[in-house]
Image (spheres, rainbow, N blue to C red):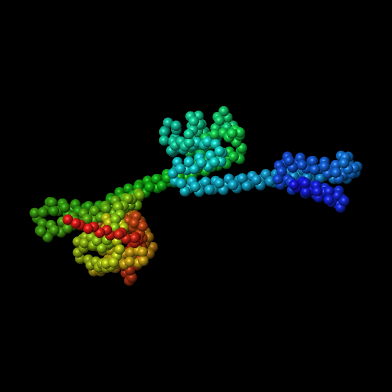
Amino acid sequence: MIWLGSWLLLWVCDDLLNLGNLALLMVLASALCGMWLSAGASLLTSLLSVLAFNWFFVPPRYTFNVNLHQDALLLLTMLGVSATVSYLMARLRAVAELESQHAQTAEQLHHLGEQFREIKDLQQQGQLLQTVLQNQTQTSVSLLLLPGAGATPDDGPACLLGQPSVEDTKGMWACVHQFANLGLGTGRYENQRSLFLPLRGRARAFGAVAIQPLPEGVWSDAMMRGMQQMCDLLGLNIERAQTLEAAQKAKEDVQHQRLRNTLLTSISHDYRTPLANLMGAASAIESQCARLSQAQIMQLANTVVTEAQHLNRMTSNTLQLARLDLAQAKVHKDWESLHEILGSVLSKMRGRHPQRVIDVDLPDSLPLVFCDAMLLVQLFDNLVENAIKYSPVNTQVLVRAHLEQDQIEIKVLDQGRGIPDTHKSQVFKPFVRLQNEAIPADASDLTLLRRGVGVGLAVCLAIVKVHEAQIQLADNLPTGLIVVIRWPVLAQPKLSSTVWSE
């Protein structure tokens, strides 16, 4: 259409324009046609157009003879310019098409990568890649997915997707071991009918793909690069997942080792004093019972009970911390009443500390909480115990609770020395205490109360986290500490009524 329009314009302008201007119209037509024609077609049409221009417009007309030298130069120049412009336009179009293909491939890879990140199961990721390659090639595609590093055909658990033949299965294993593409069109094992592409990570292959040949039996370089990029995308995704899993396992191993080391250190230091006191009191009762008065025996027995309770509390906190903080803990939750849980805690606390005043204010309208009752008992036991430890004997410990929108806010207040702002976030870490000095065997009662391994608040934080609640510390002015727990309120259960009949 462009050439037809240009020739019509040449006939119309034949008597109006000179030969040079008419030649410019031919060059313009050649440039415009180069936007659609291939390079070879553009060169051919430019040559034919120059010959036709010489036949119809260059004197003497209707011959290929040229009388004037400038006309001959004009024809040669027009042929060179038309050919050059046509070739450049064709190359520019080819580059634009290639860039469009690259952009389309990049978009396809980005979309495929997003899908890989959303799918966590390795087999489903392999099925997705298999579907994409089958849609792109319109041929049969099989996949081999390795279970781990160093897998061999004899290991067994490798995953095969599709229905590969025995030759294709061997070819995929060879592709994995050689870490290179094999088969048709690769220059390696050209006698194989299928194309084998590895699922490459940075250092090794995590599987391979077997693609049946096209009907014409030819793979273009661009198509092979695109398919290999898709395979590499899955390989890198598998490698990243395995690296993250190995890093998480290493982190857990380090945490377990740190816990074991710290626990051994704590046992060697913090458990020694209560054990010595307990053994001393028990030995005195055993060896000197006949010479001791009833009051002295009662005092020694009380020491045994107190030290045993202290050891039991430290051990329970340490084991609970190991269960909740270093593993995916499974807690058994049910609907519980805060009144009953706090009542149980305060009953035990008043038995251990009969001289202390604990003031509790719980509204009757508090909703039920969905929790593990045993963990909540340990949570409030630790908080109230700490409030008693770190406050003077003649002061009160307050426990307050109220409903605030969709949360129950529970506060435990004491009038002790408090915690500096710089240490408020540190005390929730395991085995961290504000007073780390060694406790002598003849320490005072107040000092003995402050003994521990530094896991009480760490356990509280772990219990709060598994219940999706919050805990924080604040100052109780003019002196003391406030521990604030914000517990989520869920939709309350429907009470079922049962009718009994004889």
Residue drawn at the location 38% of the way across and 63% of the way down: 422
Q: Name the side, left or right, on which 14 lies relative to 285.
A: right
Residue 144, percent from left and from top: 47, 36
User: Does residue 112 appear anywhere in the picture?
Assistant: yes
**268 or 211, which is in the foreground?**
211
The image quarter in which residue 180 lies: top right
User: Looking at the rendering, in which quadrant would you find the C terminus?
Assistant: bottom left
Residue drawn at the location 52% of the way across and 46% of the way down: 112
**342 or 420, which is in the foreground?**
342
The image quarter in which residue 432 lies: bottom left
How many discs appear? Answer: 0
User: Does residue 473 appear anywhere in the picture?
Assistant: no
**203 or 116, which is in the foreground?**
116
Residue drawn at the location 68% of the way across and 46% of the way down: 93
Q: Name the side, left or right, on which 305 lies relative to 369.
A: left
Q: Name the side, left or right, on which 383 lies relative to 302.
A: right
Give the vertical position of 145 relative to 372 (above or below): above
Residue 232, percent from left and from top: 53, 41
Residue drawn at the location 33% of the way across and 64% of the way down: 408
Residue situated furthest bottom in the rendering: 478
